[in-house]
Image: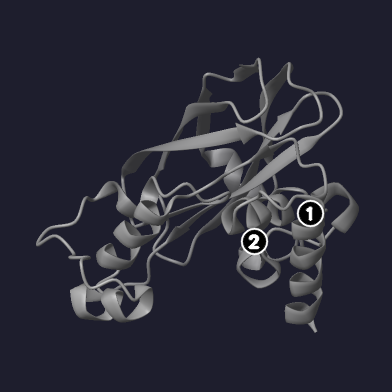
Amino acid sequence: MACPHVAAIAAYLKSLHPNWSPSAIKSAIITTNVSDPILALASADFAYGSGQLNPVNATDPGLVYETTTEDDLKLLCHLGYGTSRVRVVTGDNNISCPARTSPTAIKDFNYPSIVIPVPPKSDSFETGLLRTVTNVGSAANATYRAEVVVTTESARELKIQVKPDVLCFEYLGEKKSFNVTVCGGNFPADPFFASAALIWSDGTRSVRSPIVVYTLPPM
């Protein structure tokens, strides 16, 4: 029943905000969910996603993560779909995938969640990501402050920094970018999962993005 529930909420949001893009609607649904983690299972994020849907909160998310058509095409090319398949999907025969895709195409894809795979037995790792949010709140002037919340004990082994950690908006539709740096190390050979969340809050709204770090299975 998850699919019809989400579809109904998406249609509801579109009726209230006809100018919102599909990515803005998706972001509003994801970032306003109520998180109720399964503490006994560190990898539970891969099961329940970002949490339980909250249609009321989704109508006024405050900030949204949007992607452009160009962003989506770059991602498809990076995932190996190739020029012919991308042309079939888009119906545009003028599109061509580059011979080499940017290594940042996935990690900097402006999605409202962050997932970082790392090799097992890694001594250390450091990953930097770029995200951009758009002010869609009811107030043109708004200040959001970042907070990183640890969901599982394993996430305490990570260092997560957000710069800048304060975003000040002056008008609706204004975009602000920020960097997220995640580092850690000494990962065990066994599967490792760490779950945290980045929350932007203006004191009224909370914009929550899940953060998951996990070890890749051995090849």
Secondary structure found at label 1: loop
- Residue 54: image quadrant is bottom right
Left/right of residue 203 with respect to residue 150 in the rendered view: right
Question: In the orientation shown, which residue stands out farthest toward the right?
Answer: 56
Q: Secondary structure at mark 2?
A: helix
* Label located before the other in sequence (1 or 2): 1
Residue under pointer 2: 42
Observer able to see residue 77 = yes
Q: Amino acid at mark 1?
A: Asn
At x 81%, y 72%, the residue is 8
Report the residue at 53% width, 40% height from top: 157
Residue receiving disc 1: 33
In this view, 81 is above or below 194:
below
Q: Amino acid at mark 2?
A: Ala
The residue most toward the left is 99
Q: Which residue occupies the foreground of this view, 90 or 159?
A: 90
Residue at left 76%, top 71%? 6
